[in-house]
Image: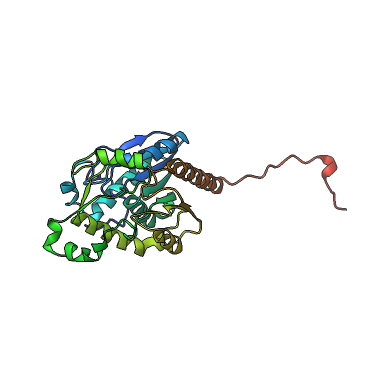
């Protein structure tokens, strides 16, 4: 499926169920969850941003909030089309729209920003996954192409294990208890076909990073076990934006929106977006000179 280049597609996303919208001010944030996750993994940050005055929408991306078999039938363009539809809907109703996401959601946000140009007020990229190179990746991942490009892709599933991207053991146990092959929180396994589509999205987005001109905040965990900090460094080097900030977090793993520094993540995201909002407003409405009436004594009459 080709991605429309000549204007927005407002015909509707493939899937819109279980989306969340927190109504706030005239600056809207499109916040996108990760692969195999749901709105729940970014909901806490969304609530904090909403308290700061933002309207926040978290769509349920195609193939999520159901079961992993449904996810296996979805292409990356379907995820993008859904994100694009929600962006255009927000753009119709709000003065500014920023984009943000976690993991795959961050990659989709960058893909959007690369195509929407100045219409994107700002980008907050969290745990951006442009390559699976974290410490929790299985030792046999070099065999993955054998799976992804053969009939094995229809049978193989990557089983989530280890620390689940969360450093806090209490939070990790809570998440593990709510995961499953059918879950409203997160899937406990990943179809090979979905990993293949994620890799296609990564490749496409890496090629387009130079087209991302919006101010961008990068937040990444030093101990990210899925996508190492090299992803954040690569992103910083290749973005086309003239305003980039990067924060490396020192006490969490991949799911920075759930883990021990989630409050810091929310606070920094809000600070950055408010800062960019004020800058855009000052550019659109420059200060006007105040002209005071002249007094007779101030006049200089040439002879």
Regarding residue 185, the answer to whether it shows in the image is: no
Most distant residue in the right direction: 303
Q: Nearer the viewer, residue 296 or 205?
A: 205
Q: Quadrant of residue 97?
A: top left
Left or right, 64 with reference to 170: left
Q: Is residue 72 above or below residue 295?
A: below
Q: How many marks?
A: 0
* Residue 127 position within the rendered picture, expressed as x and y whole percent measured from the top left: 38, 52
What residue is shown at x 63% (from left), y 44% (from top)? 288
* Residue 91 position within the rendered picture, expressed as x and y whole percent measured from the top left: 38, 44
Left or right, 114 with reference to 155: right
Left or right, 163 with reference to 263: left
Q: Nearer the viewer, residue 92 or 65?
A: 65
* Residue 139 position within the rendered picture, expressed as x and y whole percent measured from the top left: 26, 62
Q: Quadrant of residue 197?
A: bottom left
* Residue 217 position within the rendered picture, expressed as x and y whole percent measured from the top left: 46, 52
Q: Nearer the viewer, residue 63 or 4?
A: 63
What residue is shown at x 45% (from left), y 35% (from top)? 25
Q: Is residue 45 above or below residue 204?
A: above
Regarding residue 148, the answer to whether it shows in the image is: yes
What residue is shown at x 18% (from left), y 44% (from top)? 181
**Colouring style:** rainbow
Viewport quadrant of the N terminus:
bottom left
């Amino acid at each position: 499926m080709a991605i429309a280049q000549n204007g927005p597609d407002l015909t509707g996303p493939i899937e819109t169920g279980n989306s969340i919208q927190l109504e706030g001010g005239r600056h809207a944030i499109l916040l996108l969850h990760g692969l195999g996750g749901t709105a729940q993994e970014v909901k806490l940050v969304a609530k904090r941003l909403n308290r700061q005055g933002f309207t926040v929408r978290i769509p349920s991306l195609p193939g999520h909030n159901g079961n992993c078999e449904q996810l296996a039938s979805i292409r990356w363009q379907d995820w993008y089309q859904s994100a694009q539809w929600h962006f255009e809907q927000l753009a119709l109703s709000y003065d500014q729209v920023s984009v943000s996401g976690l993991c795959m959601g961050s990659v989709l946000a960058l893909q959007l920003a690369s195509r929407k140009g100045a219409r994107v007020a700002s980008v907050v990229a969290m745990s951006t996954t442009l390559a699976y190179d974290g410490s929790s990746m299985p030792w046999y991942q070099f065999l993955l192409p054998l799976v992804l490009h053969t009939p094995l892709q229809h049978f193989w599933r990557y089983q989530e294990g280890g620390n689940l991207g969360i450093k806090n053991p209490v939070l990790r146990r809570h998440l593990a208890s709510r995961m499953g092959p059918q879950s409203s929180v997160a899937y406990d396994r990943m179809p090979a076909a979905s990993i293949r589509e994620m890799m296609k999205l990564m490749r496409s987005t890496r090629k387009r990073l130079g087209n991302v001109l919006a101010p961008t905040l990068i937040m990444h965990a030093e101990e990210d076990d899925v996508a190492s900090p090299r992803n954040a460094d690569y992103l910083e080097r290749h973005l086309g934006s003239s305003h980039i900030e990067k924060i490396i977090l020192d006490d969490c793993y991949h799911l920075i929106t759930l883990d021990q520094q989630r409050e810091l993540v929310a606070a920094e995201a809000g600070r950055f977006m408010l800062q960019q909002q004020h800058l855009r407003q000052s550019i659109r409405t420059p200060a006007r000179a105040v002209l005071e009436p002249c007094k007779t004594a101030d006049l200089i009459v040439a002879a």
